[in-house]
Image (spheres, grey):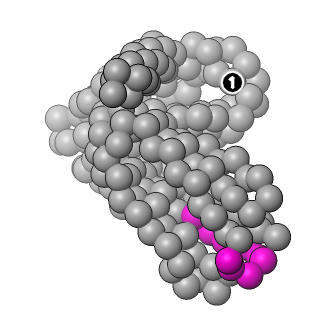
């Protein structure tokens, strides 16, 4: 029991460290009524910046192709009033900033969300799934076969979700895993066999 508590505490501290580091790297501010300035102090190759509306429609997408500083100014004058989300999609995490546009201008909710992405390790006909869940919110995983038929699912609130999926008794082929956590969906296609 002591080891479980120590491991949980370690994951929690590491998660907080990652969140604080990511928050320090991204600076979002209102320049004037309808202009939003986004600065990324330490962008990494593969990072993606997304601006989405309330329904998840992507309004802007930019792949950050170089390491170092990045800057972008968005003019939101022509978009309707509502809630928008600025996502910094990094290799292992997703940083979410909520922006509300009203007739009075823009309001930023600093670091609205931080979600760790799941990690997958495939070995023969077994797949290990790892997901850090510092908020201990419900994470749902669904596995579909190549025809889109649900073949397995689970829900968990564990701090550290570690599951091994056994594919020894199923036909070879492509299986799709969908993980939903904090309103975000992550997909992984697995080639088994």
Using the image as rendered, state which of residue 115 and residue 48 is in the foreground: 115
| Residue 80: x %, y % from top left | 30, 53
| Residue 162: x %, y % from top left | 51, 45
As drawn, which residue projects farthest toward the front? Answer: 1
Where are the magenta residues, as a range? Answer: 169-177
| Residue 173: x %, y % from top left | 77, 76
Using the image as rendered, state which of residue 113 and residue 153 is in the foreground: 153
Using the image as rendered, state which of residue 104 and residue 7 is in the foreground: 7
Relative to 69, is 106 on the left or the right?
Answer: left
Task: Say which residue label 1 marks.
Answer: 44
Residue at 26 percent of width and 41 percent of height: 101
Quadrant containing the N terminus in the rendered view: top left
Quadrant containing the C terminus in the rendered view: bottom right
Task: Say few, some or many: other residues with alpha carbon within 10 Å of mark 1 (under 14 / 14 to 19 / 20 or more).
Answer: some
Residue at 30 percent of width and 39 percent of height: 136
| 168 relative to 72, above or below | below
| Residue 159: x %, y % from top left | 36, 36
| 118 relative to 34, above or below | below
Relative to 40, is 137 on the left or the right?
Answer: left
Q: Is residue 176 magenta?
A: yes
- Residue 119 in view (yes/no): yes
Residue at 74 percent of width and 63 percent of height: 125
Using the image as rendered, state which of residue 167 and residue 139 is in the foreground: 167
| 178 relative to 64, above or below | below
Q: Is residue 7 magenta?
A: no
């Amino acid at each position: 029991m002591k080891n479980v508590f120590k491991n949980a505490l370690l994951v929690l501290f590491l998660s907080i460290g990652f969140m604080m580091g990511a928050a320090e790297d991204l600076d979002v501010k209102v320049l004037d009524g309808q202009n939003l300035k986004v600065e990324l102090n330490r962008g990494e190759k593969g990072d993606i910046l997304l601006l989405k509306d309330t329904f998840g429609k992507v309004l802007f997408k930019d792949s950050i192709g170089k390491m170092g500083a990045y800057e972008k100014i968005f003019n939101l004058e022509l978009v309707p009033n509502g809630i928008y989300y600025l996502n910094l999609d990094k290799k292992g995490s997703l940083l979410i900033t909520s922006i509300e546009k009203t007739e009075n201008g823009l309001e930023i909710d600093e670091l609205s969300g931080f979600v760790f992405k799941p990690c997958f390790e495939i070995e023969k006909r077994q797949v290990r799934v790892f997901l850090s869940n510092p908020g201990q919110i419900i994470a749902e995983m669904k596995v579909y076969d190549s025809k889109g038929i649900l073949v397995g699912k689970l829900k968990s609130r564990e701090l550290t979700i570690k599951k091994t999926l056994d594919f020894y008794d199923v036909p070879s082929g492509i299986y799709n895993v969908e993980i939903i956590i904090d309103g975000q969906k992550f997909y992984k296609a697995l080639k088994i066999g």
